[in-house]
C-alpha cells in the first residue's frame, strides 16, 4: 500500500530544476516512489513543492496564490543572500523545509512560518558497497597502491569559472590535500562533477596528481565511492551535503567539517574544525546512522509533513 493512501486527494507538484544538480534526482525519486499523490500538472496540484528557492520565479503567480506552497532551503550564504528576494518569495510560502538544523535556525530568524527539518533521503539501490574493489580500480586505471582521496562537489563559481566557491571550502580542501601529499607520495585526488577549475589549476601548479571525471553516471559514481581511501568534506556552509549520506551508505571512509547533516550522520570523531588530522573515519557508525534515511523509510517524515499541510 502506498504510504500516502489515506490522503489520495492531495496532489503534489515539483517544478523541474534542469541544472544537472542533485535536486533533479530528488524530484525524480519522489515521483517514482509516490505516484498516487503526485502530479506533473501544476493545474491539478494541491501543493507546489519548490525544492530550490530560486525556482519560484519560473512559476506563474496565479498558481502560487492559489496552491499550498512548500519551499526547501538548503543553506544560506551570507555574501549571496538577499533579504528582499527572500521576502518576495515568503509572501507565497505556507511552510518551509530545511535539510539541516543550521538552516532551520537561520530560517527562524527570517520567518515565523512552519519549518520542517529533515535531511533528504538516500537511495540504497544506487549507493551501496561493492566487494571487488580491486577490479574497479583496474577498470578506472588506478593502481592498487594509489591512495585515493575524493571530492565530488563543485568548487568554482560559475560566474567566471575561476573564483573559488568559498562556501564549499575548496581552499581548505587544497590545504588538506597538500599536507596529505607530503606523507603519501602515492596520493591521487579523484574529482567529479562540473566547475572543478579552481582545484584543477591548484593541483596542476603544485604537481599534485589528480584524475577528473566531469560528468559520470550514478553507477560509476558509486564505483568511485567504493574505491576511495578517504572522502573529505571541507565546506564552510552546507545544507547536506548529500555526499555524507552517500559515503555512509557505501561504507566510504569520510571526514567532514561540522556542516549540514554531518553531526546527524557522522561520529563526532569524524568531524574536524581546524586540524583535519584529529578526525578519524568511523565507517560502522556512519552506516548505522544513515539507514533511517534509506528508501522507503526516508520518506516517512515527509508523509507527516504533507498530512499537516492539508
Image (spheres, rainbow, N blue to C red):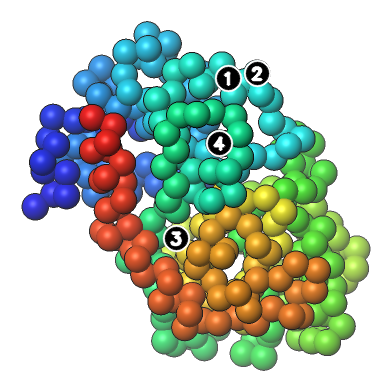
Res 142 visible: no
Nearer to me, 275 or 190:
275
Q: Quadrant of residue 235?
A: bottom right
Q: Quadrant of residue 92?
A: top left
Give the residue drawn at x 45%, y 53%. Answer: 119
The tag earlier along the polypeptide, 2 or 4, is 2
Instruction: Tell which residue pokes out farthest to the right in this image.
Output: 205
Circle on res. 87: 1
The residue to which callout 2 is attached is 84
The residue to which callout 3 is attached is 218
* Residue 216 percent coordinates (x, y): 52, 58
Nearer to me, 177 or 233:
233
Direction from residue 233 to residue 108 in the image, left or right = left
Q: Are marks 4 and 3 in contact (CB under 8 Å)?
A: no
Query: For numbered disc 4, what is the local secondary structure?
Result: helix
What whole-number distance in Å separates the C-alpha atoms at marks 2 and 1? 5 Å
Give the residue drawn at x 8%, y 52%. Answer: 1
* Residue 37 percent coordinates (x, y): 19, 37
Instruction: Tell which residue pokes out farthest to the bottom in this image.
Output: 145
* Residue 155 percent coordinates (x, y): 72, 52
Query: For numbered disc 2, what is the local secondary structure?
Result: helix
The residue to which callout 4 is attached is 108
What whole-number distance in Å separates the C-alpha atoms at marks 2 and 3? 38 Å
Give the residue drawn at x 72%, y 54%. Answer: 236
Amino acid at each position: 500500500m502506498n504510504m500516502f493512501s489515506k490522503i489520495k486527494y492531495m496532489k503534489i507538484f515539483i517544478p523541474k530544476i534542469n541544472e544537472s544538480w542533485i535536486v533533479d534526482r530528488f524530484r525524480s525519486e519522489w515521483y517514482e516512489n509516490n505516484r498516487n499523490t503526485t502530479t506533473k500538472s501544476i493545474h491539478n496540484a494541491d501543493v507546489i513543492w519548490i525544492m530550490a528557492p530560486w525556482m519560484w520565479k519560473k512559476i506563474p503567480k496565479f498558481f502560487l496564490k492559489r496552491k499550498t506552497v512548500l519551499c526547501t532551503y538548503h543553506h544560506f550564504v551570507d555574501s549571496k543572500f538577499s533579504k528582499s528576494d527572500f521576502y518576495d518569495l515568503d509572501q507565497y510560502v505556507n511552510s518551509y523545509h530545511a535539510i539541516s538544523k543550521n538552516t532551520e535556525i537561520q530560517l527562524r530568524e527570517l520567518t515565523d512560518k512552519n519549518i520542517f527539518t529533515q535531511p533528504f533521503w538516500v537511495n540504497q539501490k544506487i549507493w551501496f558497497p561493492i566487494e571487488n574493489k580491486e577490479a574497479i580500480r583496474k577498470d578506472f586505471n588506478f593502481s592498487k597502491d594509489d591512495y585515493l582521496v575524493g571530492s565530488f562537489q563543485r568548487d568554482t563559481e560559475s560566474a567566471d569559472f575561476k573564483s573559488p566557491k568559498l562556501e564549499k571550502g575548496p581552499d581548505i580542501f587544497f590545504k588538506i590535500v597538500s599536507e596529505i601529499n607530503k606523507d603519501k607520495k602515492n596520493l591521487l585526488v579523484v574529482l567529479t562533477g562540473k566547475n572543478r577549475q579552481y582545484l584543477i589549476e591548484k593541483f596542476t601548479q603544485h604537481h599534485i596528481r589528480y584524475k577528473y571525471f566531469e560528468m559520470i553516471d550514478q553507477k560509476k559514481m558509486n564505483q568511485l565511492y567504493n574505491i576511495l581511501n578517504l572522502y573529505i568534506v571541507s565546506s564552510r556552509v552546507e545544507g547536506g551535503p548529500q555526499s555524507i549520506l552517500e559515503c555512509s551508505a557505501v561504507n566510504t571512509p569520510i571526514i567532514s567539517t561540522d556542516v549540514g547533516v554531518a553531526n546527524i550522520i557522522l561520529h563526532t570523531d569524524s568531524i574536524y574544525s581546524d586540524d583535519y588530522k584529529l578526525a578519524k573515519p568511523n565507517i560502522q557508525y556512519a552506516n548505522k546512522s544513515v539507514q533511517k534515511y534509506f528508501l522507503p523509510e526516508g520518506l516517512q517524515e515527509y508523509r507527516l509533513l504533507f498530512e499537516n499541510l492539508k
